[in-house]
Image (cartoon, grey):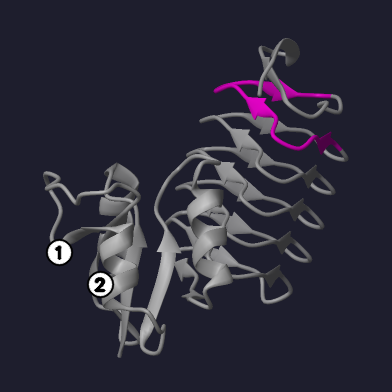
Amino acid sequence: MINVYLLGAGKHATELSEYLNGNNEYQLAGYVINLDNAINHPNIAKPVISLPSFLEKHPIALDIALIGAIGTYERKSIIELLENKGYQFINIIHQHNYISPAIKIGYGNCIAPGCVINANVHIGNHCIVNSNCNISHDCILENYVTISPGVTIAGNVQVNEGVFIGSGATIIPGITIGEGAYIAAGACVTKDVPPHVMVAGVPAKVKKTID
């Protein structure tokens, strides 16, 4: 059985901890936080250690696997550091989903329960798909996409790297969402979204530029 460390020790990490319960391939070993000194977090079942301590304890990634448990694009920097050092990243996919056998999926992804992901969807690396989401046919999710609960993405939608989609948002067919864009909760996206902007409303309109 492979020991799994979660990157992060917040609320999303507690969800992922539960998804690992009863898994016959992986077991939770602890949590890694990007701080000089590890701290104790409430509701955490396993040890929390700092990134420097983790690298010292596990300099060679033989029987260790990782997955990002930080729900923002900020997870990219720590993940890239560990990827460059050769650590393995796994997918955590809850058993209570419908996922078409015709999808393509990378690594480091989390798919929470209650999701429907249909044929020919392509999911990159290190994406988070939260509970009760629907992703229709032929969509593309690039790396580090975060999808909040209850999102509906219709067919042929392109979601570029680092996009955040808020709870209950709806994306109509054929839309492209630019890199690093932020879709506010409840928005209905009816036209392409430029990179690095926040959109909100029904129909969704650009509200501001974001870093």
Q: Earlier in the sequence, mark 1 or mark 2?
A: 2
User: How would you rate the neighbour count of disc 2 (Cα within 10 Å): few for under 14, some for 14-19, many for 20 or more?
Assistant: many
Against 59, residue 35 (above or below) is above
Query: Residue 56 appears at what percent x and percent y?
Result: 29, 72
User: Is label 1 in contact with label 2 (beta carbons under 8 Å)?
Assistant: yes
Mark 2: amino acid: Leu
Q: Is residue 176 magenta?
A: yes
Q: Specify the farthest residue to the top.
A: 207
| 208 to the left or right of 87 | right
Q: What residue range appears in magenta?
A: 175-190
Task: Point out which mark residue 46 bears.
Answer: 1
User: How would you rate the neighbour count of disc 1 (Cα within 10 Å): few for under 14, some for 14-19, many for 20 or more?
Assistant: some
Q: Considering the image in quadrants, where does the N terminus appear? A: bottom left
Q: Is residue 25 magenta?
A: no
Residue placed at 79% from the left, 35% from the top? Answer: 177
Find residue 176 and report its image quarter: top right
Q: Secondary structure at mark 1?
A: loop
Residue placed at 49% from the left, 66% from the top? Answer: 82
| 62 to the left or right of 119 | left
Find residue 152 and report its image quarter: top right
Against 178, residue 75 (above or below) is below
Can you see residue 142? yes
Query: Residue 175 appears at what percent x and percent y?
Result: 85, 36
Query: Residue 120 appears at what percent x and percent y?
Result: 79, 66
Residue at image mark 2: 28
Task: Point out which mark residue 62 bears.
Answer: none
Q: Secondary structure at mark 2?
A: strand
Can you see residue 129? no
| 135 to the left or right of 2 | right
Give the overall secondary structure of the magenta segment.
loop
| 194 to the left or right of 40 | right
Mark 1: amino acid: Lys
